[in-house]
Image (tube, helix red, strand yellow):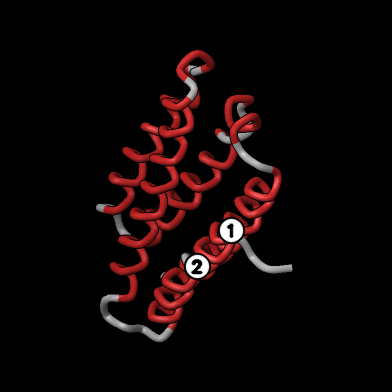
Amino acid sequence: MALSISEKLGYAGLIPFVAAAGAVLMGYEQGEEFFKLYSLLILTFMAGGCWGVEQANPEQIDEIPLELSIGTFLWGILAYFLPTNVAVLMFLVGFWLLLWTETNPIFKRSYAESYKKLRNILTGAVSLVHIVVFIAVH
């Protein structure tokens, strides 16, 4: 079975996470900064995706997911400026918060089953990489 473009792009998006984690593990000077920056960018991208779904369905909008998507973006901004060991955990919480936000009915109606499965796989992989970096910086 061929992968969809969303799946290809989603899996390709893991490459910088893995590369940055490798840089951290090998002690490259800018590895931690790159990891934090890429985490922030992807968290922001995902929060924006949630915002978009909510804006596309104004008659069904629920304040809680809307506020959580904005709050997660702000949470990520704060995390970026903190030490890596704290930031990595905050980013991890942010990714899981967005995944939990997507359990709201507005997302269940908007997302295909294949995308929900992809999100679970990608969040699991991103979580694993964040845990590895957290361990490496301790």
User: Which label belongs to residue 27?
Assistant: none
Query: Among all residues in the image, which is located at the extreme top?
Result: 59
Measured as percent of width and height from the top left, residue 17 is found at 45, 69
Of the two numbered discs 2 and 1 on the same chain, state the one appearing first in sequence.
Answer: 2
Q: How many marks?
A: 2
Query: Among all residues in the image, which is located at the extreme right?
Result: 1
Amino acid residing under circle 2: Leu
> Residue 52 or 136: which is nearer the viewer?
52
Along the horizontal axis of the image, is 31 left or right of 7?
left
The answer to whether mark 2 and mark 1 are in CB contact below 8 A is yes
Measured as percent of width and height from the top left, residue 94 is found at 46, 44
User: Which label belongs to residue 122?
Assistant: 1
Q: Give the quadrant of the C terminus.
A: bottom left
Measured as percent of width and height from the top left, residue 49 is found at 44, 41
| Label 1 packing within 10 angstroms: few (<14), some (14-19), many (20+) | some
Along the horizontal axis of the image, is 25 left or right of 7?
left
Q: Which residue sits at x=61%, y=27%? A: 104
Residue that mark 2 sits on: 14
SS label for mark 1: helix
Residue 93 higher or lower than 1, as above or below: above
How far apart in space, not on screen, are marks 2 and 1 (Cα)? 8 Å
Q: Quadrant of residue 1?
A: bottom right
SS label for mark 2: helix
Measured as percent of width and height from the top left, residue 51 is found at 41, 32
Amino acid residing under circle 1: Leu
Q: Which residue sits at x=58%, y=54%? A: 123
